[in-house]
Amino acid sequence: MFARDFLASPGLRREIHGGLQVAENKNSANTVLHYGKARTAPRPGQPAC
């Protein structure tokens, strides 16, 4: 039922696409802001991640 409405309604597709873009942009920003925070320096003899 949702798929039928989704395919039949350009407005609904635009709204969903816009919401997905917001989430994707937020995830990209978080990746940039938190780059390297969780990493620790490798110990001697330990391969880098």
Image: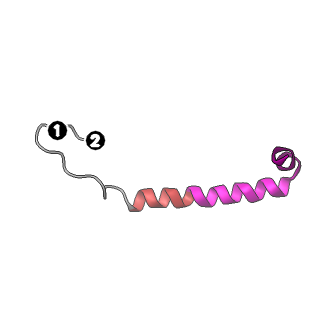
3 within the magenta span: yes
Q: Where on the picture, by quarter, is residue 19?
A: bottom right
Residue 36 versus residue 46 in the image, above or below? below
* Residue found at x 48% / y 61%: 29
Horizontal placement of 22 versus 15: left or right? left
| Mark 1 surroundings within 10 Å by alpha-carbon count, few (fewer than 14), some (14 through 19), many (20 or more) | few
Disc 1 marks which residue? 46
What colour-coding does the image apply? secondary structure
The location of residue 33, given as percent across then percent down, is 40, 62
| Residue 34 image offset from top left, x and y in percent | 37, 60
Count all numbered tags in the image, as a single digit.
Answer: 2
Q: The residue tagged with tag 2: helix, strand or loop?
A: loop
Circle 2 crowding by C-alpha within 10 Å: few under 14, some 14–19, many from 20: few
| Amino acid type of the residue that numbered disc 2 sits on in the rendered structure | Cys
> What separation in Å lies between label 2 and label 1 (alpha carbons)?
9 Å
Query: Does residue 47 sit above or below 39 in this rendering?
Result: above
Residue 49 is labelled as 2
Residue at 76 percent across and 59 percent down: it is 15
The part of the chain drawn in magenta is 1-24
Foreground of the two, 31 or 4:
4
Please give the label number shown on residue 26: none
Q: Main secondary structure of the magenta part?
A: helix
Q: Which amino acid does label 1 sit on?
A: Gln
Q: How far across and how far down the image is residue 2, in percent? A: 82, 48
Quadrant of res 3 = top right
Mark 1 residue element: loop
Q: Which quarter of the rendering shows the C terminus? A: top left
Q: Residue at x 12, y 37 (%)?
A: 45
Q: Viewed as shown, does residue 43 lie left or right of 3?
A: left
